[in-house]
Image: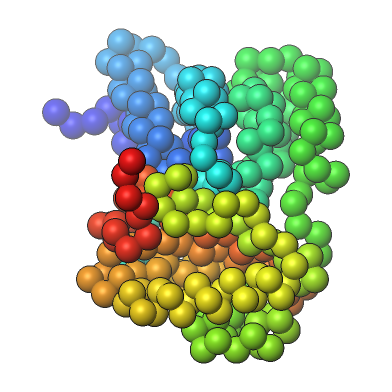
Amino acid sequence: MPEPAGVADAAGYRPLLFSIAYGMTGSVGDAEDIVQDAFLGLTRAHQAGTAIADLKAYLTTTVTRLGINHLRSARVRRETYVGDWLPEPVVVSGDRPGPAEHAELTDSLSMAFLVLLEALSPVERAVFMLREAFGYGYPDVAGITGKSEANCRQIFARARKRIAPGGRPVDGAPARRAEGEQLARRFFEASAGGDLGALLGMLAPDVVFHGDGGGKARAIGKSLADPRRVAQLLVGGFRRIRMLGVSPRPAWVNGRPGAVMYDAEGRVASVLELDIADGLIRAIRSVSNPDKLGHLGPVSEVARLPQR
């Protein structure tokens, strides 16, 4: 049977809905499931003869509230996570562009921003993200979350105080796309070539390296600061992966320059995202947890830890 007209029209909102669901969950798979559930609910509503005056508002409300419910059930798993937690990377590259909604993910949903959101309750996260990343006004946020407008203002102010002044993890001017890609290319060339001096010239004085192996893949135990130590880690790490036949392919990761690391068989070993501001790399985030890479293709075994 053909889809009802409203359901077919709703397909244009899929990128927005994916971005909201991903911002709520930090998981590509969970976001896609939430969007699918929202569309199933829309189909049932049409079949039941329910009148929907504002299709966009209906879907964004459904996705946001499904995201809130998901977070409430996932909080225990997050609290017992092994090592640093990073979101599943959303990757867009020339050779593997992926779904359209991934390519249109708002640049505001960087890994750094999503990590900050982890400090918030599910409702705080929804209110803060809708305002900060998507620019919704308080009347719309109130309608989506089911809270009063005054309450949403209080929630937003409280959330902003909890995570960081200004609600943003990185100060300074973010890199334009061409500039970011150029710096990323030089970064990966220097890392692969063991050029410590060149790397130190690209790293900010307060650079931090974050690694997420989830206890299932090799990763640093805790975040590493200090430019020289980070540069030495990179040089040593790239030397090891080269011996294992792993190499980087440039990609755009969560709206930031980075790379996907592939083994000799073309399987995904890890993903790196570079946070760049004022012409320097302020943070490097590496995801090697195999559970967070499966949406990118077959996952390599080169970084996986032996099962206990």
Q: Position of residue 81 (x, y in %)?
A: 52, 36
Above or below — where is 45 with respect to 243? above
Above or below — where is 133 with respect to 229? above
Q: Position of residue 165 (x, y in %)?
A: 85, 44
Q: How many labels does the image show?
A: 0
User: Which residue sits at x=77%, y=38%?
Assistant: 163
| In front of the other: 224 or 56 | 224
User: Which residue sits at x=69%, y=33%?
Assistant: 119
Q: Give the image quarter of residue 174.
A: bottom right
Quadrant of the drawing holding the C terminus? top left
| In front of the other: 248 or 241 | 241
Q: Give the image quarter of residue 249.
A: bottom left
Q: Position of residue 37 (x, y in %)?
A: 35, 26
User: Which residue sits at x=68%, y=30%?
Assistant: 120
- Residue 67 lies left or right of residue 163; in this view the side is left
Res 65 visible? no
- Residue 144 lies left or right of residue 7; in this view the side is right
Res 271 visible? yes
- Residue 106 lies left or right of residue 49; in this view the side is right
